[in-house]
Amino acid sequence: MIRLLVLSISALMTLSAGAAGAAELTVKVAGKPTPQVHADLVDAAKTICREDLDGVTFAADLMPYCVREVTRTAIAKVRRPELIAYDKAYGRSAYLVKISR
């Protein structure tokens, strides 16, 4: 069973003039319920996207899309069917609520 998940994102978009560095964060997923794992992944994705989009002109507009894609990439790496189902059912509202805070 996967105990840790490492989220990473490389050059997110080519919109920025400079080369974007890869950000990486470790999220513990062992023994946590699915909603908590999803919330932790969204929070980690938000942190990564903030770092990656720092200085980008339309960062606020791009943030929800970045968080969604980073979270979905992490969920695909975890490969837990209940997490995939949870993301499909509640993902959209989770991304918007988490970002607006």
Image (cartoon, rainbow, N blue to C red):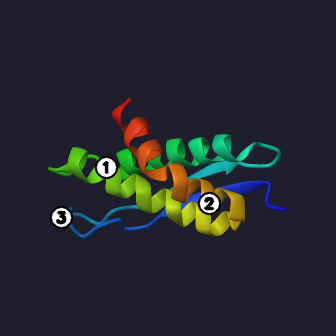
Q: Percent position (x, y) of residue 37?
A: 66, 46
Residue sticking out furthest to the top: 101
Using a 10 Å C-alpha cutoff, classify the residue at mark 1 as few (fewer than 14 neighbours), some (14 to 19) or many (20 or more).
many
Looking at the rendered structure, the kind of residue marked 2 is Ala
Q: Percent position (x, y) of residue 27?
A: 66, 48
Look at discs 3 and 2 and give the one toward the viewer.
Answer: 2
Between residues 86 and 14, which one lies in front from this camera angle? 86
Look at 31% across and 49% down and name the residue there: 63
Q: Which residue is mark 3?
A: 17
Q: Which residue is mark 2?
A: 85
Q: Percent position (x, y) of residue 8?
A: 53, 61
Looking at the rendered structure, the kind of residue marked 1 is Met
Q: Percent position (x, y) of residue 28?
A: 72, 47
**What's the CA distance linking mark 3 and mark 2?**
37 Å
Q: Quadrant of residue 2?
A: bottom right
Q: Is residue 58 left or right of residue 86?
A: left
Residue sticking out furthest to the front: 89
Name which of mark 1 and mark 2 comes first in the sequence. 1
Using a 10 Å C-alpha cutoff, classify the residue at mark 2 as few (fewer than 14 neighbours), some (14 to 19) or many (20 or more).
few
Using a 10 Å C-alpha cutoff, classify the residue at mark 3 as few (fewer than 14 neighbours), some (14 to 19) or many (20 or more).
few
Look at discs 3 and 1 and give the one toward the viewer.
Answer: 1
Name which of mark 3 and mark 1 comes first in the sequence. 3
**What's the CA distance linking mark 3 and mark 1?**
18 Å
Look at 42% across and 51% down and name the residue there: 92
Q: Which residue is mark 1?
A: 63
